[in-house]
Amino acid sequence: MSYPVQKTDQQWQDLLEAKNAEPHAFEVTRRAATERPFTGKYEQFWADGSYHCICCGAKLFDSPTKFDAGCGWPSFDQALPGAITEIVDRSHGMLRTETVCSQCGAHLGHVFPDGPTQTGLRYCMNSASLEFK
Ligand SMILES: [Zn+2]
């Protein structure tokens, strides 16, 4: 898949380092790794603002859509229109919907149709993929 923002692995690594991103941010965003639950900096973080892609800065979520899913990862019930691209993910013997940044293809996490709010959606994100502003 092709995204508007393209960089080499080395460029992403340099950019994430310069941004002081979490050490595993490259593995998460560019290799679809998953951070350990209850370890991310935004899991229990409730300030007013917005969440952006750590790689390209695209705005993904507004803070009022964040909720405590109790799963150990920052969770949202709604993404900004067009901000996220969904991909069918059949890895690990499961059928899931992967979410990536529509601008740069950064892996963000997965979206599940079991959310407790009226949207019915639970965007289960890696803190390492996000930048709060
Ligand atoms: Zn991005």
Image: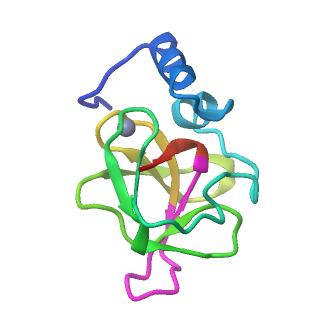
- Judged left or right of residue 104, residue 112 is right
Q: Position of residue 116 (x, y in %)?
A: 52, 86
Spot occupied by residue 114 in the image (x, y as percentages of width and height): 53, 79
Quadrant of the rendered structure where residue 96 is?
bottom right
Residue 77 seen in render: no
Provide the residue span drawn in magenta.
111-127
Q: Residue at x 35, y 38 (%)?
A: 57
Q: In the rendered image, is residue 76 in sight? A: yes
Locate residue 47 relative to residue 128 in the image: left or right: left
Q: Nearer the viewer, residue 42 or 110?
A: 42
* Above or below, comparing residue 80 to residue 35 in the picture: below
**Which is nearer the eye, 114 or 78?**
78
* The quarter of the picture showing ligand 1: top left
Residue 70, placed above or below residue 74: below
The answer to which of 122 and 11 lies nearer the viewer is 11
The quarter of the rendered structure image containing the N terminus is: top left
From the top left corner, tell me how far across and down residue 59 is, in percent: 32, 50
Looking at the image, which residue is at 70% across and 46% down?
35
Is residue 35 highlighted in magenta? no
